[in-house]
Amino acid sequence: MATAYVQIPCTNDDRQHTRVAHEMDLAYITAGGQGGLAQCVNVSRAGFALKLGRSLRPGTILSLLFEDADILESFEVQAEIAWCQPEGDSTSFSAGARIRTMSVCARDRLLELLDQHSGHYENVHASAA
């Protein structure tokens, strides 16, 4: 008999990085070529909380495209779904996405976004793309 493991969202006490509320629409595409739209709910230097119109399995690799009037230049981040669970209405899903890689330019855009909300820059790990 197989055992299923579900990775639940971490609590605020488990988080290493401060999250700041930032709502914006974004596009994503999975490594398998499936695309869609999501809403970013909050941001940290390690990842994002998202609302999705479909479920994505933990471990799914995706590229997130951030375009917003508050951001001078759009940027793209490669992330991995850490957890995903249905919302109460069962037509939308909450998910956590962990940053895997980003360009130096994307790192700078993310720092600008965090600075808009927190008033100071934090180091963000970047892997030049």
Image (spheres, grey):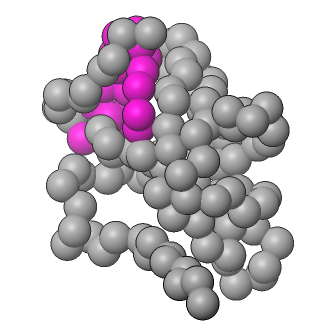
Splitting the image into 4 quarters, where does residue 10 fall? bottom left
Q: Which residues are magenta?
A: 99-118
Q: Is 115 contained in the magenta span?
A: yes
The percent position of residue 118, horizontal first and vertical second, equals 24, 41
Q: Decide: is 79 above or below 73.
A: below
At x 49% / y 49%, what residue is drawn? 97
- The residue positioned 81% from the left and 38% from the top of the image is 34
Relative side of 21 to 13, left or right: right
- Looking at the rendered image, the quarter that the N terminus falls into is bottom right
The quarter of the picture where the C terminus appears is top left
Rendered residue at 67%/33% (across/down)? 31
Q: Can residue 70 be seen by looking at this rendering?
A: no
Residue 9 % position (x, y): 42, 71
Question: On screen, 29 above or below 91?
Answer: above
Residue 7 spot, x, y in % from top left:
45, 72
Q: Position of residue 26 (x, y in %)?
A: 67, 36
Q: Which of these two is toward me, 7 or 10?
A: 7
**Viewer-side residue, 98 vs 112:** 98
